[in-house]
Image: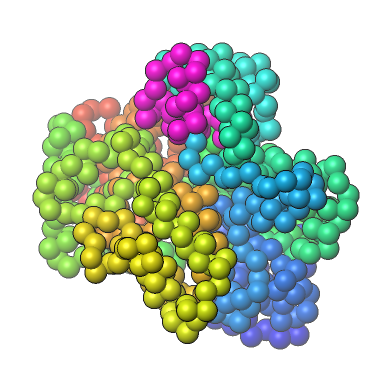
Amino acid sequence: MSDKFLQNLDEEQRAAASAIRGPVLIIAGAGTGKTRTITHRIAHAIESGVTEPSRTLALTFTARAAAELRLRLATLGFPGVQAHTFHSSAWRQLQFFWNEAIGGKPFRILSQKSEVIASALAKVGRSKSGITIRDIATEIEWAKGQEIAPEDYLRIAQERARVAPNNLSLAEVAEVYRTYDELKQEAEQLDFEDILLLLVGILEEQNSIIDRVRAQYRFFTIDEYQDVSPLQQRLLNLWLGNRKEICVVGDPDQSIFSFAGSTNEYILGFTKKYPDAQVFSLNQNYRSSSQIVHVANKIMDRELVSVRGKGTSNVRLSAHGSESAESEKITERIRGLIKSGVDTRNIAVLFRRNDQLQEYAQQLTALGIPVNIQGYSQGQRSFFYDGKIKEAIRLIRGGALARDSALDGIDLVEQVIAILSAVGWHPDRSSGDDARLRLIEFVADFQERVPQATLRDLIHEFEEREQSNVEPESIGVVLSSIHSAKGLEWDHVFLPKLREGVLPITYALSSDELVEQERRLFYVAITRARDSLTLSYSGNDSSRFLSALPALNADE
């Protein structure tokens, strides 16, 4: 048996990667090299004859993570391994079996819920706002992830003491949810949760289809397993059947998406479901300095070990008399980092809520510092929601289907430019704020990462990123919610507004369980930092989580 893919792994990683027969559970702390471990495990399993690339399916939760898995596996010599998000993998299967199972042309994917929710709000006679729409979208995602139909929502939401968004009642949310689904069906549209629900129904009802799916995929790896929802777990159970060739990887301490329907009960209960499971722990942190790891350990009572060794103290805590003084100090430090030569893309400011980003965006922009706002923020549209981008992707998709011989022999960037030039657009004639320039930059980056990529590969990448709301990277200081920062890392991270009522957020204070989720959120935020971490608050009511920290340098 070859062990070439086990070389250059640490002892913990090697033990986990050597376990190529399931079931396997890998508890991977923040920054411990879980992606490296699972890709080398998959490569080792293929090399050893346990599985084949075409029979192997790796699932994760973001397009960025899926792309990273595919790239690393291709680098190891196995480009045929399927690595996708849950939604992308399900959509591929649903499209393939649509005519057989449902008939007719597949419905269109609804990339954004906001417009349909706005129409639903208007139809039931309620006013709309960006925050209301965003919060209702999250509540619908939670309901569908829990497999709660519109007609059952009110009863179950009341039983579970759900808090309705903004000034709405749970009864009004139920009505908006019902109307949203009706409008969507009338327009022959599917949201991303519908994809999973439809596929589950097909696989449960049609044995001939599920038999073919199970014949295709035999070796499963599930990344970020602490974030699965009941609906995703149900689909995974259908894919697996009675087989045990499954490896799940995750960290219960990074479970932060219960508001959207995920639960860590599956990772915590894995050994109960599979008593014969092999269990491994990764504790060597390769990302963060020893001081940052020490702070993270204090928050969650962990024993992660930084392999980077000790250096100068790089964790600071500062108190300010006002929020304006706090933001001014942070923008001053950011400007200092940039003047010292730090790339803006290596700096991030993370917030508990999306609506807290705008103040910092305005201050940094006023200083001439570019910003890159991640995820959703009030008044901002997603990159993939931009009309020019939607049209460009439609044209590229058409080019991929047409297989124009004129595009043969030129690289991917040139192909995309040629397609867009046919409708009168060219990067040399575009203004600097044209979103299509950012699209071209992304295509160039994608081509560098995947040199043999085709237009079809590019379209698939767009689809996965759109599903997961993972936008192409752009120049600028990153402003992001902590939730949107999950899975990312930066050299320098700032965590402002660490007050009671913000982190932990006010509604969490009524429940010990919710407070603990807020603690996990704080832990996730801390572990995004590689080289420096700055914590701050204003006023006298600092977050309870700060009391658990060791003595830190004051931010002068």
Predominant SS of the magenta segment:
helix
Apparent side of residue 269 relative to residue 163 in the rendered image (left or right): right
Q: Nearer the viewer, residue 478 or 125?
A: 125
Residue at left 17%, top 68%?
Answer: 341
Q: In the rendered view, tell whether residue 364 sits above or below residue 500.
A: below
User: Is 359 part of what is drawn in magenta?
Assistant: no
**Region of the chain picked out in magenta, as a range:** 114-143
Quarter the N terminus occupies: bottom right
Residue 337's spot in the image, x, y percent? 17, 60
| 407 horizontally vs 349: left or right | right
Residue 464 seen: yes
Q: Position of residue 547 (x, y in %)?
A: 35, 37
Name the residue: 31% across, 63% down: 425
Q: Nearer the viewer, residue 463 or 411?
A: 411
* Number of numbered discs: 0
Return the residue nearer the eye: 330 or 148. 148
Query: Where does the image place residue 273, in percent across and percent down from the top left?
Result: 79, 47
Is residue 218 left or right of 160 when viewed as pictured? right
Q: Is residue 302 left or right of residue 88?
A: left
Q: Quadrant of residue 505?
A: top left
Identify the residue at horizontal 37%, vertical 62% (top origin): 423
Q: How was this image coloured? A: rainbow
* Residue 349 position within the rendered picture, expressed as x and y whole percent measured from the top left: 29, 48
Residue that appears at 50% across and 15% down: 124
Res 280 visible: no
Q: Is residue 115 magenta?
A: yes
358 above or below 98? above
Residue 69 quadrant: bottom right
Q: Quadrant of residue 532?
A: bottom left
